[in-house]
Amino acid sequence: MKENHPSEKDKALSALLRAWKPDASLPPRFQEAVWNRISCAEAAPTFSLWQALASRIETALRRPALAFSYVTVLLFAGLGVGYWQGEGKTAQAASEWRARYVQTVDPYQMPRN
Amino acid sequence: MKRSWLILFGGLFAGLLAYTCIYLHATSAQRSLEQSSHPELAWLQKQYRLTDTQLAQVVQLHDAYQPKCAALCRRIDDQNQKVQLLLAATNTVTPEIKQALAEAAQLRVECQSAMMQHFYEVSRAMPPDQGKLYLAWVRQETLLPGQMVPTKPAMRMAK
């Protein structure tokens, strides 16, 4: 529906708002309390990155499923890496001994001083 | 709170412990071989499943062969040095160079024969199937073309 006289309504609303007098009174020392809260908020300790991380870790490891998974993964990672490196070391040593044996029996491959 | 940290560091410790245990277990055979007086022969025992008696026989053969091998080694070095000197003194193949090369070839034959004789003796000290495997391996390592290239004496001459 088309509004014919919008400015008249605005004027009426403005007049009504001007005439409104709130009868509630502010609590005692209201302004001081506001400023106190502002200063307290500014002085509140800020969490460092480490603290935030520690907090997150603590929160996460409180969950039994996650804690169990964490320990299991580390355990299997340790087993896997240990086995892989041990096998590599053994293979390398075997290769060295093969070469050393050949050097001890073949005059053409024997190391010269 | 304490429980979370216990889990965190306990997990890390468990991983580290698992790594150490499996690594030490996987390298235990290698460490015991390293402590023997002849690690390469101890490897031979492990590789070709020799008994202690068979290993003792192999060690005896090895020790008996070593002086012959060292003597051949010295003769190879001397012969190579002779050839290098002759080659450096001229820009054509002289009868002396031909003679020196023939001697080097003859020395190679002698060396190969001594090696093969030793390999056959060692293989006979092994169980038959393992002896065959050993012979195949040493032939591949020592007698294939390109294996008997005397590099060091030539390098020494170049200095």
Image (cartoon, coloured by chain):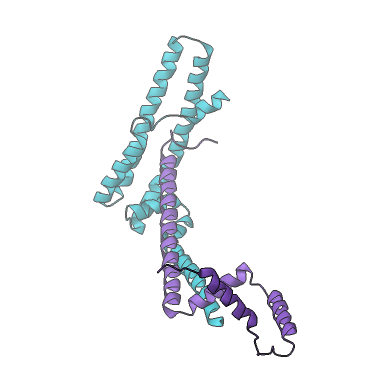
Relative side of A90 to B133, left or right: right
Q: Can I make out residue B159 in this image? A: yes
Q: In the rendering, what colour is chain A?
A: purple
Q: Hey, which quadrant is residue B113 in on the image?
A: top left
| Quadrant in the picture for the N terminus of chain B | bottom right
Position of residue B52 measured from the top left corner of the image (x, y, whole percent): 36, 58
Q: Hey, which quadrant is residue B110 in on the image?
A: top left
Compared with B99, A26 (above or below) is below
Identified at 45% across, 54% down, the residue is A89
Compared with B22, B155 (above or below) is above
Relative side of B45 to A62, left or right: left
Q: In the rendering, what colour is chain B?
A: cyan
Position of residue A61 measured from the top left corner of the image (x, y, whole percent): 49, 77
Position of residue B99 measured from the top left corner of the image (x, y, whole percent): 42, 15
Nearer to the camera, A93 or B63: A93
Relative side of B52 to B154, left or right: left
Q: Can I make out residue B117 in this image? A: no
Nearer to the camera, A82 or B106: A82
Q: Hey, which quadrant is residue B115 in on the image?
A: top left
| Quadrant in the picture for the C terminus of chain B | top right
Compared with B32, A17 (above or below) is below
